[in-house]
Amino acid sequence: MANFTGNPLYSCRKCRNPVALRDDLLSKKFVAKSGAAYLFAHAMNVVLGHKEEKQLMTGTFVICNINCSKCGDELGWKYVRAYDATQKFKEGKFIIEKARILKEY
């Protein structure tokens, strides 16, 4: 686990493992299983699950769940493929549930 200073970051609520930088936050206007979720350009210290096709509110996607690399808590998912051309901007990006993370300074 790397140590980060200066810029705010988001950590796993369960074990405080850093999982995303504030600079990589793209949007706070997403919804996941537990409610509010954030879209990030990058995530770190996460383990990717197997790929699966899933019907979400905005269409059908290939996603893989992401888990904290330290404690294994499920944090959200990574968009692998979007079938709808208007949703292609999500490919390669990460959804992290707000309820699963803490913002740290």
Image (spheres, grey):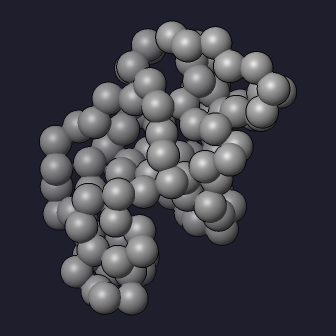
Residue 9 placed where, x, y %?
A: 70, 33
Relative to 34, 102 lies left or right: right
The answer to whether any part of residue 66 appears in the image is: yes
Which quarter of the rendered picture does the C terminus lie within? Answer: top right
Q: Name the image quarter holding residue 28.
A: bottom right
Q: Which one is nearer the viewer's eye here, 54 or 12?
A: 12
Numbered circles on residues, count? 0
Residue 94 placed where, x, y %?
A: 45, 52
Relative to 58, 100 lies left or right: right
Instruction: State whether residue 54 is above or below residue 83.
Output: above
Who's the residue at 68% across and 47% down the image?
23
Residue 81 placed where, x, y %?
A: 24, 67
Q: Which one is nearer the viewer's eye here, 45 or 58?
A: 45
Who's the residue at 38% across and 80% down the image?
87
Who's the residue at 42% across and 74% down the image?
89
Who's the residue at 28% across and 36% down the image?
48
Q: Name the image quarter holding residue 80.
A: bottom left
Relative to 35, 43 lies left or right: left
Residue 104 placed where, x, y %?
A: 78, 27
The answer to whether any part of residue 68 appears in the image is: no
